Amino acid sequence: MLGITCEGGASRTVYSCGVLDRLLDENIICDSFYGVSAGIAFGVSYISRQKGRNLSLACDYMPTKKYMGAHHLFRPSNRSFYNLDYAFHDIPCKLLPFDMKAFSQYKGSVKAVVTNVDTGKAEYLEVPRDDEDFMLLRASCALPMLFPMIEIGGQKYLDGGLADSVPYKQQQKDGCDRQIVILTRPRGYIKHDEPLMALIEKRYRKYPALIESIRTRADRYNKCIAELEQLRREGKVFVFSPKHTFGVNRTENERSKLIRLYNYGYAHADREIENIKRYLLK
């Protein structure tokens, strides 16, 4: 059973979009898709087989002030760096339609990773096939300080990457014996402690388990990547990671940079496509 795991990374995830679009060219469709933060927000377009949709998003919407910017943080109805209703409802439902029918017809599992703010633990939740407000995707993307907490079923959540940035182990537990993991950081990247930890401790003081999860995130992430690298060397997991991100940061909105990174991801997958096919036949 083939699983695809997509790390988050906000704007850097346009690299992953290029990789996924090249897989669509070859009709390489996974049986299980796990995404974290932007990894799932962009990843659902792969599941609905809408090649190029994410590129259009990067070209036509992400560079605009209506999509993202600090001014959105100060709107009481939004409280996020991103214009939430615009990004998660207006665009997919009206401006750049998401094929909900094709998504609903997908027979595999599509899971978004979220962090439970009370326990500080990751939860792996099936993405609803009929939610036009994409509340679970909002929760998976809810970066501390840049998003409000997102409530689903009476429980509050934040970004899944706080608890499990690359959930390949969970996907293995769910039965995937072949895995493609798409990272958004270059190989050799080392995550450091959260520089805003003092502000985070103040903002989320009512949630000690969440604070502890954020405090230990860097160490857990680095161990996870080291384990994943060993599995890559052994040929047990196929890992994509960009050699370059071309200066694209988490909240990048410069159109030319986003397109360059998307094209780089597409070209990277193109170079590896025969190796992927051999790996899938093992």
Image (cartoon, rainbow, N blue to C red):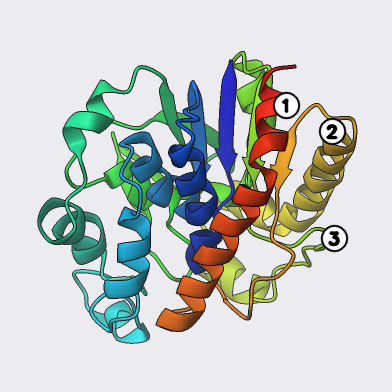
Residue to which mark 1 is pinned: 279
The residue carrying pointer 3 sits among few (fewer than 14), some (14 to 19) or many (20 or more) residues within 10 Å by Cα, namely few
In percent of width and height, residue 259 lies at: 46, 72
* SS state under label 2: helix
Residue under the point 25% across and 63% down: 87
Mark 2 or mark 1: which is in front?
1
Who is closer to the viewer here, 242 or 138? 242
**Residue 36 sits above or below residue 173 on the image:** below
Q: Give the residue type at disc 2.
A: Leu
Name the residue tied to disc 3.
188
Q: Position of residue 103 (x, y in %)?
A: 27, 31
Relative placement, left or right, of 79 versus 14 is left
Residue 205 in view of the camera? no
Horizontal side of residue 9 vs 131, given as left or right: right
Height in image: 125 above or below 212? above
State the residue position of label 2.
231
Residue, x 25% and y 22% (percent of image)?
A: 105
234 to 162, vertically: above or below: above
**Residue at 48% in and 68% down:** 11
Rendered image: mark on residue 176: none
- The mark nearer the N terminus, 3 or 1, is 3
Question: Residue at the spot x=51%, y=79% of the render?
Answer: 257
